[in-house]
Image (cartoon, rainbow, N blue to C red):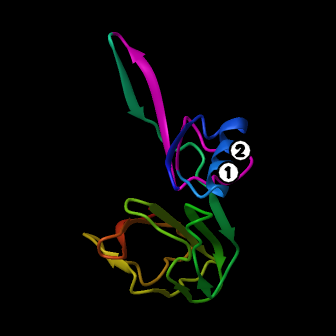
Amino acid sequence: MTKKCLVLGAGGFIGGHLVTRLKSMGHWVRGVDLKYHEHKKTDADEFIIEDSSDSGNKKSIKRKNIVRPIVNSTTTTATLTPNIDEYEQEDVTDLASAMTIAAPTGTPSTGMRLIFRITDDGTARALTWNVIYRAIGVTTPSTTTANKILYVGCIYDEAGSKWDVVAVKEEA
């Protein structure tokens, strides 16, 4: 029988191994900690960075920033296929040709975030986005600007089966 499990301290040595064990038993696991595991990617279905602290008479939960996202770094590529089961950010440096950003592999869930950080090799390069990326209030970039860092932020919408592009920022 599949159970839903909550592991507090899932970013630590023991908690991280407990998450792995519960997943191997077929359970759905939510991990919570102040930080991600330092030595391996979590196996949790959902991982929340939280800080639980005593604030007088009640317990309060405050969301903390992710200190170190799990980044995949690539020097240059013609087709970028993000693996969202493994990485939260795709970092492409020295892009030397046009690039197609393909649909991610892995199993996304609502609210999952994906960030692209792209820099070219000094020459503007064309960018083509798979139709799974849907612009929401922004324009999805079609080129890089020579020698400028470009960030593109996406959030997964399970109802629409789309990665919503919600932020586009370029170095000044």
Determine the image quadrant of residue 163: bottom left
Span of residues in magenta: 29-56
- The residue at the far left in this view is 137
**Image disc number at residue 76:** none
Query: Which quadrant of the figure contains the C terminus?
Result: bottom left
The residue indicated by pointer 2 is: 17
Image coords of residue 90 (percent x, y): 58, 67
The residue indicated by pointer 1 is: 20
Image coords of residue 38 (percent x, y): 70, 44
How far apart, in angstroms, are the residues tagged by discs 1 and 2? 5 Å
Provide the secondary structure element on which disc 1 rests.
helix
Image coords of residue 125 (percent x, y): 54, 85
Residue type at numbered disc 1: Thr
Tell whether 59 sits left or right of 148: left
Tell whether 32 sits left or right of 163: right
Provide the secondary structure element on which disc 2 rests.
helix
Residue type at numbered disc 2: His
Q: Nearer the viewer, residue 27 or 84?
A: 27
